[in-house]
Amino acid sequence: MTSGESAEPRPDEDFELRLRALEVGLWDYDIDADLLVCDARWYQITGLQPNMVRSLADFRPFIHPEDEALATTIDLAMVVELIARDLRYHVDFRLIRPDGQTRWIRSVACLLLDAGSGHHKAVGCITDNTDFALIAAARAFTRPATRSDPDIPDPAAAIGAAGAALSEREIECLRWVSLGKTAWETATIMGRSQRTVEFHLVNATRKLSASNKIHAAVIAVRKGLI
């Protein structure tokens, strides 16, 4: 590499390795044709056999009954609006694997109008967020989060050491840092850009008078903010 060459990797360089490191499963859904195509990692995360799911109807039996509508209902008017505004969406739901395990899944997607077929499509990925969900559930069980408890911080008004309130987004970003996620991984999980996540982490670090984002996450855990 010469001094004039960029040190940044090409977007397609080692793409499969990057996806493996991120631990995401990819999916492509043709909304109008009800055709769902998923990669090998998607099937590993869901615990389903390869090529077992080809439509939402195939997938519905594995979604927790209480989350089925949330995870599979399609509002075409909202789809059109999201495409027009170039917005992403995400949904969290419980998946019941064939072996009986319940996993918390986050699905993030972009929507588009396919130039070839004219069909509305969603292209996205899933991550297994079960560890995060279990930690949150354990904390809620051992220490009910009631507003009458002065030791339980209100996420919308959690106060850092510097006296500034942490926002809900800052708290969410710190939670993912505490679980070992990078800004890139957190951005994918939350359905935000990496720059946005880094912005929230910088603000949280400053508000907690921390030296870096890891230090900020440690302080937040000690204070019971996350």
Image (tube, grey):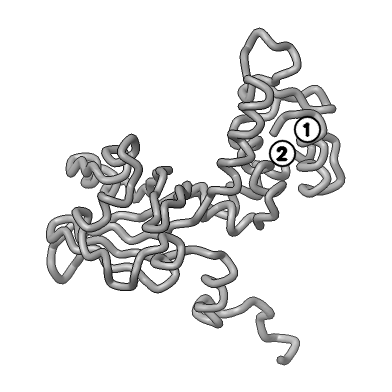
User: Along the horizontal axis of the image, is 33 left or right of 205?
Assistant: left
Position of the C terminus by quadrant:
top right
Q: Is residue 157 among what the camera can see?
A: no
Whole-percent x and y of residue 120?
A: 19, 56
In the rendered image, the vertical position of residue 80 relative to residue 209, given as above or below: below
Residues 154 and 50: in front is 50
Whole-percent x and y of residue 53?
A: 26, 64
In the rendered image, the vertical position of residue 196 relative to residue 188, given as above or below: above
- Tell me the quarter of the picture where residue 167 sits: top right
Q: Distance of mark 2 from mark 1, alpha carbons?
A: 6 Å
- Tell me the quarter of the picture where residue 138 sits: top right
Q: Residue furthest front?
A: 99
For label 2, the residue is 203
User: Along the horizontal axis of the image, is 16 left or right of 150?
Assistant: left
For label 1, the residue is 207
Q: Residue at x 41, y 60 (%)?
A: 46
Q: Residue at x 63, y 43 (%)?
A: 173
In the rendered image, the vertical position of residue 6 relative to residue 165, given as above or below: below
Pointer 2 and pointer 1: residues touching (CB < 8 Å)?
yes
User: Along the horizontal axis of the image, is 128 left or right of 3?
Assistant: left
